[in-house]
Amino acid sequence: MPARSLARSSPASSSLTARIVESILLLLPAGLILVAAVRQGENGGMMLWIGTGFQLIVCLLNFVSRHNRRDSIGPSIITLYVIALGWLWLGSRGSTDWYPPMAQAILLVMPLLVFALQILTDSGAPAIRRAQALAAALANRRDWPSDLAACRGLPEVKALRESLHVDAAPALALLRNRRPEVRIAALAALEFRQNWRPGQPKMILQLAMRAEEPAVRAAALTALGNVHEREIVEAVAEFLRDPSWEVRRAATEAILWDTQHCWGWIRHAVRRALGDHACQEDGPLFCDGQPLTADAVADLTAWSGEKGAVGTRAATTLGSHYNRVLSDGAPPELLDQLRSQLSDPHAPPSLRIELARLLRANGELDHELLEQLIDPVNPAPLRLNAVEALLSKGDHIGARAALHDLARLPNREIALATAALVQRRLGVDLGLAANEPLPPIHSRQAAEVTRRVLCWAANHDQANDDPNNAPIIFARMEERA
């Protein structure tokens, strides 16, 4: 049978076979006593009939209690056979029939065999043998998916993962295979494994360091996600600056899902990764594990005040962390803390901008705080966010004044964002296409939009100097546009 068919049909068929064998073994003592009672007939068989009924009742109780349970049946079988041996000995004393000695021999030998099988199973030998067979099937497989990442989801890989609960050696033997598909399949069977023998995690780490395929490196890092050895964790953290995004993502998930145990080991590597210009497009460092610890939040808050990529990515990472906490139901103390950071002019600007977006998206910005944020002492992006939030609720004189103030800033990026807000909230056409992303900063369209924004702000100033000329000025501005 091919390996794929074996992997698909074996679990169901083996489970059914195991249930049938268990049922036969449980009912066999009652059957042996029943035959002995029938053979004795009326000559002292009452004890055997009572023993048969007792055995059947115990079997029934065992079936009911074992419903949907996966613990071992060995102790139950041994107990039933020993009790049946006592019933048979009491009920057949003085009998000259050949059957009782034979039945007693069976009732004595079967518990010994079951006990031996139980010891063998507990030793893990059958699981290791099955794992070796599945590993050999993967090594000899020829039809692999064209996408290396798809090798991780094969049924054979899932079966191998379930059979490796005793020892990872059968999968580790596949890491020497030349084909990357086989190595990825073996590593996928070891994903986030907890029980390692000494030296095994280092084998995975060495493979990650020397593998040329990004998919192999990513699978190796995922396999090390539950290792809590400092040397291994620090080495995995260095992959946060790997040339491949796939590997960087795997390293993030492997070390950031539980910062409670390892943040002190990886904080320096995390900071270097945040400041790496080659990784700026990755966005925040985020994974679906446990929330960041207080130490990690404190470090990221401090880093968000630095210039360059470190500050920007640290702020976005904190934004992702707080967004997850808020979605899970944040306590009021945390909301008060975030609002306090947002209103603090000495807090890192990049962090304040992220907090403003986050709190606004969650409906946690009140009117008083928004009016405080449009003050000129705040960063321009923060003021823009507050202006749009105020204008989305209706006309606001202070928000309009702040918008004209922002339009006069000599910054093309701010000018484009201001133009988009003016078009969206005030209905003034400044040359931007509706429902389209902003043009590149250095494009001719961006230069023209910037000129129109400055003209719009200048005309507003003239209109304020002489209110009677306001209609004429705005009409001229529309003609120029």
Image: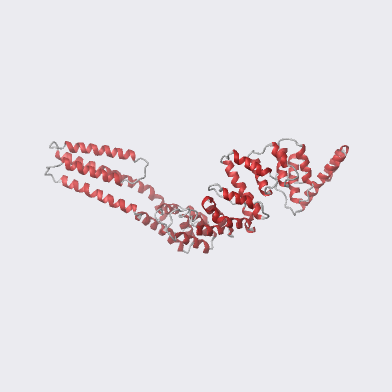
**Residue 430 visible in this rendered orientation of the protein:** no
Q: Is residue 452 left or right of residue 385?
A: right
Q: Is residue 458 left or right of residue 79?
A: right
Quarter location, residue 479: top right
Residue 341 is situated, as x and y percent measured from the top left of the image, at 66, 44
Residue pictured at 36% horizontal, 42% vertical: 69
Count the numbered circles shown: 0
- From the image, which quarter does the C terminus lie in? top right
Quarter location, residue 364: top right
Task: Give 370 or 459, whichever is nearer the viewer.
Answer: 370
Task: Give 397 or 18, whichever is nearer the viewer.
Answer: 397
**Residue 44 visible in this rendered orientation of the protein:** yes
Q: Is residue 279 left or right of residue 436?
A: left
Residue pictured at 56% horizontal, 41% vertical: 328
Residue 172 is situated, as x and y percent measured from the top left of the image, at 44, 60
Q: Which colouring convention does the figure follow?
A: secondary structure
Q: Is residue 448 left or right of residue 38?
A: right
Task: Give 284 or 245, whichever is nearer the viewer.
Answer: 284
Residue 183 is situated, as x and y percent measured from the top left of the image, at 47, 60
Q: Is residue 349 above or below residue 41?
A: below
- From the image, which quarter does the N terminus lie in? bottom left
Residue 114 is situated, as x and y percent measured from the top left of the image, at 28, 49
